[in-house]
Image: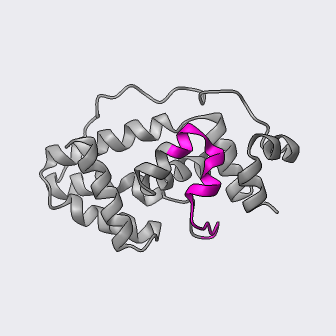
Amino acid sequence: MDETEFWELIDGSREVAEGDPQEQADVLVERLLQLDPDSVLDFARHFEARYHRAYTWDLWAAAAVLLDGASDDVFDYFRCWLIGQGREVFEGALHDPDDLAELLDDFDDEVDGDGEELGYAADEAYEQLTGSPMPDLGLPPQPREPLGTVIDFEDDDALAERFPTLWDRFRP
Protein backbone atom coordinates (compact mmCIF):
# COMPACT_ATOMS: atom_id res chain seq x y z
CA MET A 1 0.00 0.00 0.00
CA ASP A 2 1.41 3.35 -0.95
CA GLU A 3 0.79 6.73 0.66
CA THR A 4 -1.96 7.65 -1.80
CA GLU A 5 -3.90 4.47 -1.03
CA PHE A 6 -3.47 5.13 2.70
CA TRP A 7 -4.96 8.62 2.39
CA GLU A 8 -7.77 7.34 0.13
CA LEU A 9 -8.81 4.92 2.89
CA ILE A 10 -8.69 7.71 5.47
CA ASP A 11 -10.64 10.16 3.29
CA GLY A 12 -13.20 7.63 2.14
CA SER A 13 -13.94 6.45 5.66
CA ARG A 14 -14.29 10.05 6.93
CA GLU A 15 -16.69 10.94 4.10
CA VAL A 16 -18.92 7.92 4.73
CA ALA A 17 -18.91 8.69 8.46
CA GLU A 18 -19.74 12.35 7.76
CA GLY A 19 -16.87 13.41 10.01
CA ASP A 20 -17.89 11.40 13.10
CA PRO A 21 -14.59 9.92 14.39
CA GLN A 22 -16.20 6.91 16.07
CA GLU A 23 -18.16 6.03 12.94
CA GLN A 24 -15.06 6.69 10.83
CA ALA A 25 -13.16 4.08 12.82
CA ASP A 26 -15.93 1.52 12.24
CA VAL A 27 -15.98 2.24 8.49
CA LEU A 28 -12.20 2.06 8.36
CA VAL A 29 -12.19 -1.38 10.02
CA GLU A 30 -14.78 -2.59 7.49
CA ARG A 31 -12.64 -1.35 4.60
CA LEU A 32 -9.44 -2.80 6.04
CA LEU A 33 -11.18 -6.17 6.37
CA GLN A 34 -11.50 -6.20 2.58
CA LEU A 35 -7.69 -6.19 2.26
CA ASP A 36 -5.12 -8.90 2.83
CA PRO A 37 -3.20 -8.93 6.15
CA ASP A 38 -0.02 -7.56 4.57
CA SER A 39 -1.91 -4.53 3.26
CA VAL A 40 -3.38 -3.96 6.72
CA LEU A 41 0.17 -4.02 8.11
CA ASP A 42 1.20 -1.48 5.48
CA PHE A 43 -1.73 0.74 6.48
CA ALA A 44 -0.71 0.42 10.13
CA ARG A 45 2.86 1.44 9.30
CA HIS A 46 1.63 4.53 7.44
CA PHE A 47 -0.65 5.44 10.33
CA GLU A 48 1.99 4.88 13.00
CA ALA A 49 4.64 6.86 11.10
CA ARG A 50 2.30 9.85 10.88
CA TYR A 51 1.29 9.45 14.49
CA HIS A 52 4.96 9.75 15.49
CA ARG A 53 5.55 12.71 13.15
CA ALA A 54 2.75 14.57 14.91
CA TYR A 55 4.47 14.25 18.30
CA THR A 56 5.50 17.90 18.58
CA TRP A 57 5.14 20.52 21.29
CA ASP A 58 3.54 22.96 18.86
CA LEU A 59 0.86 20.50 17.83
CA TRP A 60 0.24 19.51 21.44
CA ALA A 61 -0.20 23.18 22.36
CA ALA A 62 -2.58 23.68 19.42
CA ALA A 63 -4.61 20.70 20.68
CA ALA A 64 -4.67 22.35 24.10
CA VAL A 65 -6.10 25.50 22.52
CA LEU A 66 -8.77 23.58 20.61
CA LEU A 67 -9.70 21.30 23.50
CA ASP A 68 -9.16 23.75 26.36
CA GLY A 69 -6.35 21.56 27.67
CA ALA A 70 -4.75 18.31 26.56
CA SER A 71 -3.33 15.59 28.79
CA ASP A 72 -0.97 12.93 27.41
CA ASP A 73 -3.87 10.63 26.50
CA VAL A 74 -5.94 13.45 25.02
CA PHE A 75 -3.01 14.44 22.81
CA ASP A 76 -2.57 10.81 21.71
CA TYR A 77 -6.23 10.67 20.66
CA PHE A 78 -5.97 14.10 19.04
CA ARG A 79 -3.11 12.91 16.82
CA CYS A 80 -5.22 9.96 15.67
CA TRP A 81 -8.13 12.32 14.97
CA LEU A 82 -5.80 14.65 13.07
CA ILE A 83 -4.69 11.81 10.79
CA GLY A 84 -8.35 11.00 10.29
CA GLN A 85 -8.93 14.51 8.93
CA GLY A 86 -6.94 13.68 5.82
CA ARG A 87 -3.68 14.61 4.21
CA GLU A 88 -4.31 18.33 3.66
CA VAL A 89 -5.32 19.01 7.26
CA PHE A 90 -2.65 16.70 8.69
CA GLU A 91 0.25 18.08 6.66
CA GLY A 92 -0.97 21.64 7.08
CA ALA A 93 -1.13 21.25 10.84
CA LEU A 94 2.35 19.78 10.95
CA HIS A 95 3.68 22.66 8.85
CA ASP A 96 2.05 25.27 11.11
CA PRO A 97 -0.48 24.26 13.77
CA ASP A 98 -1.94 27.79 13.74
CA ASP A 99 -3.20 27.00 10.24
CA LEU A 100 -5.75 24.65 11.81
CA ALA A 101 -7.90 27.77 12.21
CA GLU A 102 -8.32 27.82 8.43
CA LEU A 103 -7.99 24.10 7.73
CA LEU A 104 -10.90 23.08 9.97
CA ASP A 105 -14.38 23.99 8.76
CA ASP A 106 -15.69 23.72 12.28
CA PHE A 107 -14.64 22.10 15.51
CA ASP A 108 -16.87 20.77 18.28
CA ASP A 109 -14.72 19.80 21.24
CA GLU A 110 -17.46 17.41 22.38
CA VAL A 111 -16.98 15.25 19.26
CA ASP A 112 -13.91 16.41 17.38
CA GLY A 113 -10.34 15.95 18.49
CA ASP A 114 -10.80 12.42 19.84
CA GLY A 115 -9.82 9.73 17.36
CA GLU A 116 -8.85 7.05 19.85
CA GLU A 117 -10.71 4.33 17.95
CA LEU A 118 -9.01 5.32 14.68
CA GLY A 119 -5.73 4.41 16.33
CA TYR A 120 -6.96 0.85 16.88
CA ALA A 121 -8.63 0.26 13.49
CA ALA A 122 -5.71 -1.55 11.87
CA ASP A 123 -5.12 -3.69 14.98
CA GLU A 124 -8.77 -4.70 15.05
CA ALA A 125 -8.89 -5.53 11.34
CA TYR A 126 -5.64 -7.49 11.45
CA GLU A 127 -6.81 -9.56 14.40
CA GLN A 128 -10.15 -10.29 12.71
CA LEU A 129 -8.37 -11.32 9.51
CA THR A 130 -5.69 -13.50 11.09
CA GLY A 131 -6.91 -14.43 14.55
CA SER A 132 -3.61 -13.07 15.89
CA PRO A 133 -2.57 -9.72 17.32
CA MET A 134 -0.70 -7.38 15.02
CA PRO A 135 3.04 -8.06 15.06
CA ASP A 136 5.65 -5.40 15.66
CA LEU A 137 5.64 -3.00 12.72
CA GLY A 138 9.41 -2.60 12.69
CA LEU A 139 9.23 1.18 13.03
CA PRO A 140 11.47 3.23 15.29
CA PRO A 141 9.76 4.03 18.59
CA GLN A 142 8.19 7.39 19.24
CA PRO A 143 10.70 9.87 20.68
CA ARG A 144 10.66 10.16 24.46
CA GLU A 145 9.87 13.86 24.28
CA PRO A 146 7.89 15.78 21.66
CA LEU A 147 9.95 17.59 19.05
CA GLY A 148 10.35 21.35 19.21
CA THR A 149 10.24 23.89 22.00
CA VAL A 150 8.11 23.38 25.10
CA ILE A 151 5.11 25.69 25.40
CA ASP A 152 3.35 26.21 28.73
CA PHE A 153 -0.21 25.05 28.08
CA GLU A 154 -1.38 26.94 31.15
CA ASP A 155 -0.08 30.29 29.85
CA ASP A 156 -2.93 31.78 27.82
CA ASP A 157 -0.79 34.72 26.72
CA ALA A 158 1.92 32.40 25.35
CA LEU A 159 -0.67 30.26 23.54
CA ALA A 160 -2.41 33.31 22.07
CA GLU A 161 0.94 34.70 20.92
CA ARG A 162 2.09 31.43 19.33
CA PHE A 163 -1.31 30.61 17.75
CA PRO A 164 -3.01 33.96 17.12
CA THR A 165 -5.43 32.76 14.45
CA LEU A 166 -6.35 29.56 16.26
CA TRP A 167 -6.75 31.44 19.52
CA ASP A 168 -8.97 34.12 17.97
CA ARG A 169 -11.22 31.59 16.29
CA PHE A 170 -11.57 28.96 19.00
CA ARG A 171 -10.90 30.87 22.24
CA PRO A 172 -12.67 34.24 21.85
Looking at the picture, tell me which residue is in the foreground, 98 or 31.
Answer: 98
How many numbered marks appear?
0
Name the foreground residue: 156 vs 133: 156
Q: Is residue 24 above or below residue 133?
A: below
What stretch of residues is rendered in magenta? 92-110
**Residue at image coords 60%, 30%:** 146
Residue 34 image offset from top left, x and y in percent: 15, 61
Q: In this view, does 82 lie to the left or right of 121?
A: right
Can I make out residue 102 in this image? yes
Give the image location of residue 54, x and y in percent: 52, 39
Residue beneath the point at 28% across and 62% down: 29
Quarter of the figure with the C terminus: bottom right
**x, y percent for residue 149:** 70, 27
Q: In which quarter of the image is the N terminus?
A: top left
| Residue 141 location, quadrant | top left
Q: Is residue 134 above or below residue 136?
A: below
Q: Which of 41 and 96 is in front in this view?
A: 96
| Model colouring | one colour
Q: Where is residue 53 in the image (x, y as percent from the top left)?
A: 48, 34
In the picture as drawn, the residue positioned furthest to the left comes out as 36
Tell me if residue 59 comes above or below residue 102 in the rendering: above
Residue 80 belongs to the span the image colors magenta: no
With respect to residue 162, does 70 lie above or below?
A: below
Which quarter of the figure has residue 159? Answer: top right
Residue at screen point 26% across, 47% down? 4
Q: Taking 172 as reference, is 85 left or right?
A: left
Is residue 104 in the magenta section?
yes
Residue at image x 22%, y 52%?
126
Q: Can residue 133 be seen in this view?
A: no
